[in-house]
């Protein structure tokens, strides 16, 4: 299973949602039946503090996952560059990183 690289832009004070469609090595949809998904945002890979995305599998058979943050959460994130990843966990406990990348958090003006 390949790890996709994706870069995000998150605006502070706004709701954020991103959907990913995962594929197997043979380019077919990755069946996520009986999997769970999790995702975090950190300033650096070694940072001890993290922001957890609300992470859901929106269509298991098509390999679709969604990560999101509410506006109250994004308002509390300082602007700058961050890193994130998305991991899936099988019912047997096997963990795989399926998406990784950087996130640019941009400050807002209107309150």
Image (cartoon, helix red, strand yellow):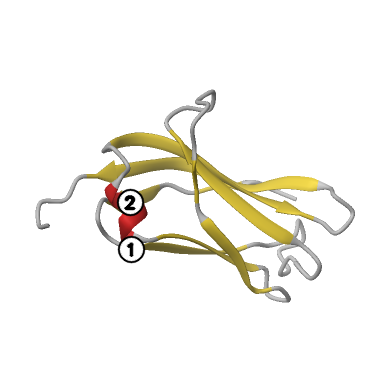
Q: Examine the image and state in which quarter residue 58 appears.
A: bottom right
Q: Which residue is mark 1?
A: 15
Please provide percent x and percent y for residue 44: 46, 27
Is 51 in front, or is 86? 51
* Dot placed on the residue nearer the N-terminal end, 2 or 1: 1
Q: Residue at x 28, y 37 (%)?
A: 78
Q: Quadrant of the C terminus?
A: bottom left
Left/right placement of residue 71 relative to residue 61 reads left
Q: Tell me if label 2 and label 1 are in contact, CB under 8 Å.
A: yes
Q: Examine the image and state in which quarter residue 23 appears.
A: bottom right
Please provide percent x and percent y for residue 95: 77, 46
Left/right placement of residue 68 relative to residue 36 reads left
Question: What is the number of the mark on residue 76?
Answer: none
Q: Secondary structure at mark 2?
A: helix
In this view, the residue farthest toward the right is: 92
- Rounded to the nearest angstrom, the CA distance separating label 2 from label 1 is 7 Å
Q: Which residue is mark 2?
A: 74
User: In the picture shown, does residue 25 fall above or below 31?
Assistant: above
Q: Mark 2, residues whose alpha carbon is within 10 Å: few (<14), some, or many (≥20)? A: many
In this view, the residue farthest toward the left is: 110
Q: Residue at x 71, y 64 (%)?
A: 27
Is 56 in front, or is 8? 56
Please provide percent x and percent y for residue 93: 85, 50
Please provide percent x and percent y for residue 26: 77, 61
């Amino acid at each position: 299973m390949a790890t996709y690289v994706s870069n995000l832009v998150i605006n502070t004070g706004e709701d954020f949602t991103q959907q990913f469609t995962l594929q197997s090595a043979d380019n077919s949809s990755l069946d996520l039946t009986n999997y769970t998904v999790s995702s975090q945002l950190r300033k650096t890979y070694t940072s001890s503090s993290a922001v957890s995305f609300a992470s859901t599998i929106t269509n298991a058979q098509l390999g679709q996952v969604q990560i999101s943050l509410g506006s109250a959460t994004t308002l509390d994130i300082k602007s700058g560059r961050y890193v994130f990843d998305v991991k899936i966990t099988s019912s047997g406990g096997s963990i795989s990183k399926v998406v990784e990348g950087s996130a640019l958090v941009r400050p807002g003006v209107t309150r």
